[in-house]
Image (cartoon, rainbow, N blue to C red):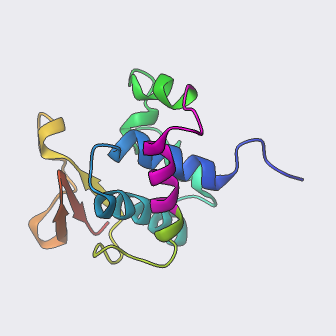
Amino acid sequence: MMRVIPDDVWGAMTVYCEARGETYAGQVAVARVTRNRVRQGFARDVAGVVLAPYQFSCWNTQDPNRLVAARLDSDDPRLQQCQRAWAESATNDAGVGDATMYYAPSGVAHVPSWAKPEKFVIQIGAHHFFLG
């Protein structure tokens, strides 16, 4: 049986919605966090990881990126780059190692409680990456 929306599509759409304004390296890093979460058992698949409540802001009910994702066109060169970044993240950790969390300080009012200095891994573009 084939799922209507395969995990590779969920992954690429999430990279697009979360990091389309980042460099390619930043997109690979965001993708790798998603893969790390699956590998570490946050959920059994990519869809379960990205759609978990309040985990990836682009899928939150009030986030306008949900509608952007629903209207993505496969010819969009930015989406094609995010698809490449998603595929590359299977073998390239982009410097984030086992990080399972990230946030963009410019996009939040308060530093998340899990963003502890001792868990910090790296900053790539606007995103700060952390171990879970």
Position of the C terminus by quadrant: bottom left
Q: Main secondary structure of the magenta part?
A: helix
Residue 19 at x, y percent in the picture: 33, 47
Q: Residue furthest right?
A: 1
31 or 39: nearer the viewer:
31
Q: Is residue 84 magenta?
A: yes
103 or 90: nearer the viewer:
90
Which residue does the image show at 16% across and 36% down from the upper left? Answer: 108
| Side of 2 relative to 118 (left or right) | right
The relative height of residue 70 versus residue 25 in the rendered view (above or below) is above
The relative height of residue 14 versus residue 127 in the rendered view (above or below) is above
Where on the picture, by quarter, is residue 128? bottom left
Which residue does the image show at 90% across and 53% down from the upper left? Answer: 1
Where on the picture, by quarter, is residue 20? top left
Q: Is residue 68 magenta?
A: no
| The residue stretch that appears in magenta | 71-86
Where on the picture, by quarter, is residue 44? bottom right
All told, the count of numbered labels is 0
Residue 12 at x, y percent in the picture: 52, 50
Which residue does the image show at 55% across and 25% down from the upper left? Answer: 71
Residue 9 at x, y percent in the picture: 61, 48
Which residue does the image show at 43% across and 30% down from the upper left? Answer: 60
55 or 95: nearer the viewer:
95
| Side of 117 relative to 5 (left or right) | left
Residue 18 at x, y percent in the picture: 36, 43
| Side of 14 relative to 130 (left or right) | right
